Structure formats: structure tokens, C-alpha cells
Image (cartoon, rainbow, N blue to C red):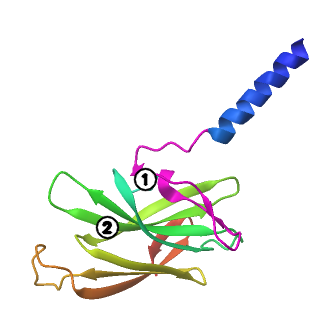
């Protein structure tokens, strides 16, 4: 009887940890980890916690690749943070594989009210591109100035190259 009870507890705990989602109040988005058409695992950062932002939304633009040379697929995303004012602050952040599970990186600030375009990972280097305004243009102006930045994941931190 005692062995049966222990077996039920172990099965219940395993089921709980298997079905329990990664809970985070910092990011709003629905989704799950995905497998691409080629069968490669694609981590889903929608429940990740990224440092440097209070409450952010994961935008659709994503890039998959290996950022920390461990042979596992990582993902880089754009985040949008809306404070109480008129600004919409855009960041780039990574969701990187670790020895046991994935972890959100710090968020790298890109700009206020910019228009994110693309994000790519090639040879461990992240390239983000977006539209911004010129230095003398007001925030009310439509972003039309093309900007590109390179980022790297080094010592657990996403940073400009």
C-alpha cells in the first residue's frame, strides 16, 4: 500500500511539472514551443522573464540560431514596453538555452516609437534592423531612417558588438 501511494505521488508530481507552464508576469503573449517543418526545436520565449523591462509584449519578429555555442537553438525577439505615457519602448532580448532549461537575457534598448523590421542570427551574431527618426525629428514623425545594430551574447549578457 505504501509503495502504491509513493508511486501515485511521483506520477502526480511528474504530471504537474510536465504540464505546468513557465509563469511570468513580465511578458504577455500566448504560444508554445514549436517544432519547425524540418523538425528542429524552436523555443518559445512568450513566458520568459527578461531583465531591464517591467512589463513587455513579445513581438512577432523572431530569429533562431545558436548564440552560446552549445548546439541548441536559441531565439532573439523584439519586446515592446508601454509605460503610462505616450512612449512605446522597443528592446531586443534573447531566450538562451542553459544546462537544464532556457532563460531570458537582459533587454537591449533600441528606441522609443521605432518600427522594428527584421532580426537575424548568423554565426552567433544578432543583427536587428528597424526604422527610426532622424536626430532632429520629433517623436510624432513617422520613423523612416533605417538603422541596423549587431549584438552578441557574451558571458550571459546580450550586448552591442
> What's the residue at 79%, 28% (across, down)?
10
Q: Nearer the viewer, residue 111 or 22?
A: 22
Label of residue 126 in the image = none
Residue 38 forms part of the magenta stretch: yes
Image position of 104 (left or right of 3):
left
Image position of 127 (left or right of 81):
right
> What's the residue at 51%, 58% (across, down)?
45
Residues shaded magenta? 20-48
Whole-percent x, y for residue 76 in the image: 50, 69
Eyeballing the image, is 30 above or below 141? above
Q: Nearer the viewer, residue 28 or 161?
A: 28
Q: Nearer the viewer, residue 69 or 88?
A: 88
Q: Do callouts 2 and 1 mark residues in contact (Cβ within 8 Å)?
A: no
Whole-percent x, y for residue 94 in the image: 50, 66
- Can you identify the residue that label 1 sits on? 29
- Can you identify the residue that label 2 sits on? 90
Whole-percent x, y for residue 92 in the image: 41, 69
Residue 33 forms part of the magenta stretch: yes
Task: Examine the residues drawn in magenta and state their main secondary structure.
Answer: loop
* Disc 1: CA contacts within 10 A as few (<14), some (14-19) or many (>=20): some
- Secondary structure type for disc 1: loop
Can the viewer see residue 93? yes
> What's the residue at 83%, 16% (across, down)?
5
Amino acid at each position: 500500500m505504501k509503495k502504491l501511494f509513493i508511486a501515485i505521488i511521483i506520477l502526480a508530481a511528474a504530471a504537474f511539472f510536465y504540464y505546468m507552464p513557465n509563469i511570468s508576469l513580465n511578458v504577455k503573449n500566448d504560444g508554445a514551443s514549436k517544432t519547425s517543418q524540418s523538425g528542429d526545436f524552436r523555443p518559445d520565449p512568450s513566458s520568459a522573464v527578461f531583465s531591464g523591462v517591467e512589463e513587455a509584449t513579445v513581438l512577432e519578429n523572431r530569429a533562431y540560431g545558436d548564440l552560446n555555442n552549445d548546439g541548441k537553438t536559441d531565439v532573439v525577439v523584439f519586446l515592446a514596453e508601454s509605460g503610462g505615457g505616450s512612449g512605446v519602448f522597443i528592446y531586443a532580448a534573447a531566450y538562451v538555452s542553459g544546462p537544464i532549461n532556457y532563460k531570458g537575457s537582459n533587454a537591449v534598448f533600441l528606441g522609443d516609437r521605432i518600427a522594428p523590421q527584421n532580426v537575424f542570427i548568423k554565426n552567433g551574431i544578432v543583427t536587428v534592423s528597424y526604422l527610426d527618426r532622424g536626430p532632429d525629428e520629433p517623436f510624432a514623425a513617422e520613423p523612416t531612417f533605417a538603422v541596423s545594430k549587431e549584438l552578441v551574447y557574451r558571458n550571459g549578457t546580450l550586448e552591442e558588438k
